[in-house]
Image (cartoon, coloured by chain):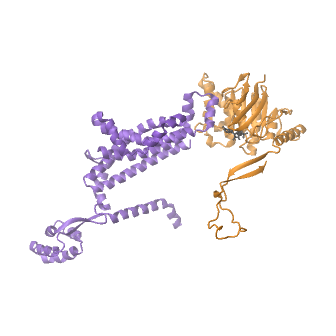
């Protein structure tokens, strides 16, 4: 059996099926990207691997052991960083290191923490609190924390989605470099096919929800280390990108998404002058939109 | 530039204006001491006769005194004749009286005069219920500190359990909703009964009981809300690291709840300070509230105003102090 194996995993919340028949196998040392639309169920999938939620049916195994609860053998970088705001960069990572290696000497723990802070180039910010850091720096802390517990597999849930394009590119290179250094097994969740192809050995699209499932696995046979500029000219890169995007769009084919939302602004509806004002139909007060509770808009995505 | 300068000290000028208006209104409705003729109808003639009889230069003095008395400005007679025979001659025909919209209410001057000794020697102790105002404040604060500590010690864990357990919440919610609006005035007698056996400590214990049970609710409720509001992400971090229950509590849950807890602590302190006054009044313990009630019974109304102002200022200071602490934890 593969190192990480998901078999026929399904998950529903209430009546809505989020994930359906997910099959995934990842070998040790592989870097796999899973790309999907937002709201498709990517976080749900990573939470199942992490053991934070249980699948309704199917099994998830790591190293032939069924995943039943979270544990430090799987390092997670959460979508929203999830740093503890009352701890500094150092303390956030130390909490993890201290917990996972209780028998180490204090000096060894400290050295280990410092090493990981340095790995993500944050040594100058080691005593800052998360609120004093930019989004990119927070995400680096989160990556450093994920790696510091020396997990068997690193799960990255849209680690770069909230960042601006430049920071994003820098951090992509950093992730790529760290991966070369550590040879960790990595599952990267992303909503950007380019990012997935640039970083991963394999990229697997997740179809649009509800009832999302994994599509075919596309192997990225571009040698590491990859050059961001040169890669755009690779024929295989272009083809891969076309295929992945096409698959994802097709999975949405013919799907109309109806969104029900509450209206906020503007509050007053324009008066309809075509309606004659008779004594009975004329309203003294202009009609307010807030009186119309909600409306349904059909959107083609 | 002048205008700018005025704008800059708005914060000082506007409150001052507000305070002046308030004091002005008070003074306008307050009563003041004056002298009126004992027998309004024939009083002037009687006084004339009395003056002429009592003083050799009676006629002369009468000329000066008459217009003042006739216009009701007898106070001025007293001031120019103070300590002389003239006042002795006038006094039998007049009597002291308070006039004004609310005659019994002391005016600003009276309140100040009467309160001065208590402010000038704030730590003096002349008797059990006759002490400098800060000494009274100190006594009240000590009692509040004890009761408040008790409220926090009881309220915080209860709040935590409420936040953690839905069943516990459902179980205790009706009790809390019923007990919460009960006034301190209602709790105190129960406290007295509960500590009947404690002898001379009974009143203190009853006061502590009342403060604790009235002041703990904001702490209980805010802590519960805070625990429920702990972001799932933080708990996920704890789960992934497999933190022990104790470590999850101390390293994640308590720090995450602190901002809410401190909001509760601040509100609780405000209530504790409200309750202390009522508790002291009912038990007659020395303190600002006890002093206030005693002086009311002794008809020294000036001191009521002194006490009210002291209670208000101390309450305000406590609230400010707590919000400084609260803000420190907000940003954490
Ligand atoms: N705990 C939950 N309870 C109910 N619905 C949930 C829960 N978690 C996620 N969902 C729903 O599942 C769907 C997928 O969510 P998620 O996995 O976060 O998507 P993604 O990470 O791909 O953006 C969404 O429609 C979301 O509303
Ligand atoms: Mg997500």
Judged left or right of residue A67, residue B66 is left
| Residue A79: % across, % down | 69, 38
In the depicted view, which residue is nearer to us: B186 or B287?
B186
Residue B261 visible here: no
Q: Which shade is chain B?
A: purple
Q: Quadrant of residue A265?
A: bottom right
Q: The orange chain is which one?
A: A
| Residue B127: % across, % down | 24, 45
Looking at this rendering, what residue extends furthest in the front direction?
Answer: A280
Residue B54 sits above or below residue B242 on the image: below
In the depicted view, which residue is nearer to us: B171 or A199?
B171
Residue B87 sits above or below residue B129 on the image: below
| Residue B45: % across, % down | 14, 76
Q: Quadrant of ligand 1?
A: top right
Judged left or right of residue B134, residue A236 is right
In the depicted view, which residue is nearer to us: A137 or A84?
A84
Residue A170 visible here: yes
Tell me which residue sits at (23%, 70%) in the image.
B76
Tell me which residue sits at (36%, 44%) in the image.
B186
Q: Quadrant of residue A263?
A: bottom right
């Amino acid at each position: 059996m593969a190192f990480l194996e998901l078999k026929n995993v399904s998950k529903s919340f209430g009546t809505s099926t989020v994930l359906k028949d997910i099959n995934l196998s990842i070998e040790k040392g592989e870097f796999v990207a899973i790309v999907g639309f937002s709201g498709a169920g990517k976080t749900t999938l990573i939470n199942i691997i992490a053991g934070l939620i249980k699948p309704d049916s199917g099994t998830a195994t790591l190293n032939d052991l069924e995943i039943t609860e979270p544990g430090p053998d799987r390092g997670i970088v959460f979508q929203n960083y999830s740093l503890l705001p009352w701890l500094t960069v150092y303390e956030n990572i130390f909490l993890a290191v201290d917990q996972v290696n209780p028998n180490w000497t204090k000096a060894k723990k400290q050295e280990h923490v410092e090493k990981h802070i340095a790995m993500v180039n944050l040594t100058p910010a080691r005593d800052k609190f998360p609120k004093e850091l930019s989004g990119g720096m927070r995400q680096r802390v989160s990556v450093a924390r994920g790696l510091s517990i020396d997990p068997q597999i690193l799960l990255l849930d849209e680690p770069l989605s909230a960042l601006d394009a430049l920071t994003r590119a820098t951090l992509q290179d950093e992730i790529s470099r760290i991966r070369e250094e550590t040879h960790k097994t990595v599952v990267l969740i992303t909503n950007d096919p380019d990012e997935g192809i640039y970083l991963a050995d394999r990229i697997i699209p997740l179809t649009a929800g509800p009832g999302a499932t994994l599509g075919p696995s596309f192997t990225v046979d571009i040698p590491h280390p990859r050059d961001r500029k040169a890669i755009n000219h690779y024929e295989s890169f272009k083809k891969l990108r076309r295929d992945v995007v096409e698959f994802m769009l097709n999975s949405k084919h013919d799907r109309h998404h109806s969104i029900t939302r509450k209206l906020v602004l503007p509050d007053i509806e324009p008066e309809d002058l075509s309606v004659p004002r008779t004594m009975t139909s004329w309203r003294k007060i202009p009609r307010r939109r807030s009186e119309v509770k909600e409306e349904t808009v059909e959107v083609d995505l | 530039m002048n205008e700018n300068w005025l704008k800059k000290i708005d914060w000082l000028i506007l409150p001052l204006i507000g305070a002046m208006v308030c004091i002005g209104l008070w003074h306008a409705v307050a009563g003041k001491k004056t002298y009126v003729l004992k027998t309004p109808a024939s009083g002037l003639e009687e006084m004339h006769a009395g003056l002429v009889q009592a003083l050799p230069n009676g006629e002369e003095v009468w000329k000066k005194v008459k217009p003042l008395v006739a216009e009701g400005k007898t106070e001025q007679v007293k001031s120019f004749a103070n300590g002389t025979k003239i006042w002795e001659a006038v006094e039998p025909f007049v009597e002291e009286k308070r006039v004004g919209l609310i005659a019994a209410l002391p005016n600003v001057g009276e309140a100040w005069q009467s309160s001065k000794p208590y402010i000038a020697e704030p730590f003096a102790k002349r008797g059990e219920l006759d002490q400098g105002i800060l000494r009274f404040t100190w006594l009240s604060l000590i009692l509040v500190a004890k009761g408040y500590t008790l409220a926090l010690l009881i309220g915080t864990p209860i709040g935590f359990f409420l936040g953690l357990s839905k069943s516990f919440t459902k179980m205790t919610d009706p009790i809390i909703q019923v007990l919460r609006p009960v006034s301190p005035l209602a709790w105190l007698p129960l406290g007295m009964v509960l500590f009947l056996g404690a002898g001379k400590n009974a009143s203190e214990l009853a006061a502590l009981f009342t403060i604790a049970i009235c002041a703990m609710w904001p702490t209980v409720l805010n802590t519960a809300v805070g625990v429920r509001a702990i972001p799932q992400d933080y708990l996920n971090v704890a789960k992934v690291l497999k933190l022990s229950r104790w470590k999850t509590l101390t390293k994640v849950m308590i720090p995450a709840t602190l901002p809410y807890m401190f909001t509760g602590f601040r509100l609780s302190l405000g209530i504790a300070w409200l309750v202390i006054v009522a508790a002291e009044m009912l038990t007659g313990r020395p303190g600002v509230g006890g002093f206030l009630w005693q002086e009311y019974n002794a008809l020294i109304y000036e001191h009521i105003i002194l006490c009210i102002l002291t209670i208000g200022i101390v309450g305000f200071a406590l609230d400010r102090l707590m919000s400084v602490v609260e803000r420190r934890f907000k940003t954490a």
